[in-house]
Amino acid sequence: MTNNLYDTIIIGGGPAGTSAALHLAYHKRKVLVLDRGTSPMHFHTNTIMNFAAGPCYQEGRSLLRQLQIQAQAGGSSYIAADVVEVKGTYPEFIVRTDKSYRTDDQSEYKAKTLVFATGTSRKHPKVDGMWRKWLPVANVGNGAFYCPDCEAPLCKDKDVLVVNAGTVGSALHAANSLTRWAKKIRILMTEDAYMPINEQDFTKLENSPFEWYRGTIKEVDFPRPGLVQSVTLENGSRIRCNVFFVAFVAMARSEIARQVGVETDNRGNIKTDHRGKTNIEGIWAAGDCRPITQQIAMATGTGNYAALMINQFLGNEQETEIQRDHPEGRGLIHLD
């Protein structure tokens, strides 16, 4: 156990957590980022085209690494760790980590303030009943895409199979987003998806302009990713395409936050005000674990805004209000 008291511990080292760490470190705050390395950017954001601060066709894990290097250069500390418990109240929170298959860290850390930037858990399609069997195609490069806003242009003139791992709504949203780019769009409704399909869903599909299939995936094949790919269903039928586009369901990782009384909505998203402050004094949240659009620009923005407020909070702990710009116009923002 360390006796050092950090100004801020940030749980999650994705774009939101790293943006918060960068801002706080440059303001000479003692910052620790605990990251277990499971951000969706690490695994299946193949190409990002709509993040203005980076070049086009930036790979997710490469962009994230650049952000983390910048935050560390500013003075942030990073530890690969799996957080299993958070307790305490302002001005001393205790964060406990434990060994897992991802990390070996087993420690306790203390901080005056916390930022939950824990992101979401994206549900992959299942292959032969197991989602891990989908990961090879998710990691291969241009074999599978996930974000209509980030990656749809990469499907230009492609034969796309939208593979549903979420809801009919998410599948139709992905398909509709691709109509300006793809040559052909079909939908596969997987019967072992995480959200059950009902009769109303079938009506929506029948009324859509898209050809669609129903079944469970037995095998996935991608000999030439982005050009020649296919899925084989349990009934033996095979669907060939150029590329897969996954319509996924994302669940906020908020279990640890709830341990200290942080409020969440009915979908598990952490509730905050517009500055990222939660209902618990000294705790903020940033990024996709909040109910925001899941975009890197949004995540980094909320991380930066939360850090700005924390820096003000730590610098004005005896004050009750400060003068800042905010969405309602220039006026008072209350810190408590």
Image (tube, helix red, strand yellow):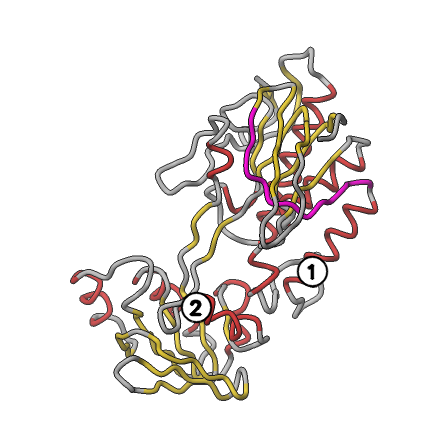
Quarter of the view holding residue 245: bottom left
- Sequence order check: which comes first, mark 2 or mark 1? 1
In this rendering, would 235 be left or right of 217? left
Q: Amino acid at mark 2?
A: Val
Q: Secondary structure at mark 1?
A: helix
State the residue at coordinates (29%, 86%). 236
The C terminus lies in which quarter of the figure? top right
Asked whether 84 falls inside the magenta stretch, the response is yes
Quarter of the view holding residue 47: bottom right
Gap in angstroms between the C-alphas marked 2 and 1:
21 Å
- Between residue 98 and residue 75, name the one nearer to us: 98
Where residue 156 appears, as percent x and y from the top left, is 51, 80
Q: What secondary structure prevails in the magenta region?
A: strand
Q: Which residue is mark 1?
A: 63
Badge 1 crowding class, 10 Å Cα cut-off, few under 14, some 14 to 19, many 20 or more, is some
Badge 2 crowding class, 10 Å Cα cut-off, few under 14, some 14 to 19, many 20 or more, is many
Q: Amino acid at mark 1?
A: Leu
Q: Secondary structure at mark 2?
A: strand
State the residue at coordinates (64%, 43%). 17
Q: Which residue is mark 2?
A: 246
In this rendering, would 197 be left or right of 188? left
State the residue at coordinates (35%, 69%). 129
Where residue 28 appears, as percent x and y from the top left, is 82, 31
- Magenta range is 75-87
In the rendered image of this protein, does residue 74 appear above or below residue 30?
A: below
Asked whether 284 falls inside the magenta stretch, the response is no
